Amino acid sequence: MARTVRESRSRLVRHALQAAGLLSLALGVIGMFLPLLPTTPFLLLAAACFMRSSQRFYLWLVGHPWLGPWIRDYLDGEGIPLKGKVYAVGLMWTSILLSCYLIPLLPVRLLMLASAALVTVYILRQKTRPIRAD
């Protein structure tokens, strides 16, 4: 997966993109533990920001043993592992149903259920990555 890193010429733009990339990276890592916060989109955004601002940060992120595979697999079109799909959907629905139980407002419940249903459809429509023989 060779991607060209083209840093912006403007120092201000590079710093702004690095800040956005670090924020996205932090949100992506938090999303690994909070099922309502997506992980992959934030990691992809961080990679895109670093690709235009810092070759060092970009190479660190895509080469990271835990975070890198999320980005590389998505960019290479390999899809999501079945175990990841089951984990994501199961944990999301568990947290949504618990939240619906705790929150008495019907419009909020309906919004959470609709969001969970749409995210579930999105996850299930993604290509399922075959099991690797690593």
Image: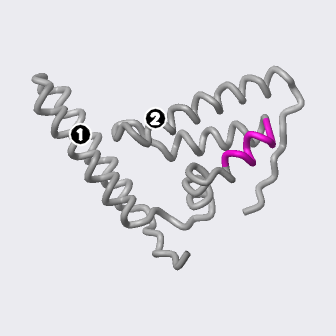
Q: Position of residue 39 (x, y in %)?
A: 47, 43
Residue 108 located left or right of residue 47: left
Q: Position of residue 21 (x, y in %)?
A: 65, 33
Mark 1, secondary structure of its residue: helix
Mark 2, secondary structure of its residue: helix
Which residue: 34% across, 41% down?
35
Q: What kind of secondary structure does the magenta stretch mostly adopt?
A: helix
Which residue: 14% across, 25% down?
103
Q: Position of residue 62 (x, y in %)?
A: 67, 51
| The magenta segment | 54-61
Q: Is residue 1 above or below residue 9?
A: below
| Quarter of the image where the N terminus is located | bottom right
Query: In front: 98, or 33?
Result: 33
- Looking at numbered disc 1 in the image, what kind of residue is underneath it? Ser
Mark 2 or mark 1: which comes first in sequence?
2
Residue 43 located left or right of residue 114: right
Residue on which the image places disc 2: 30
Residue on which the image places disc 1: 95
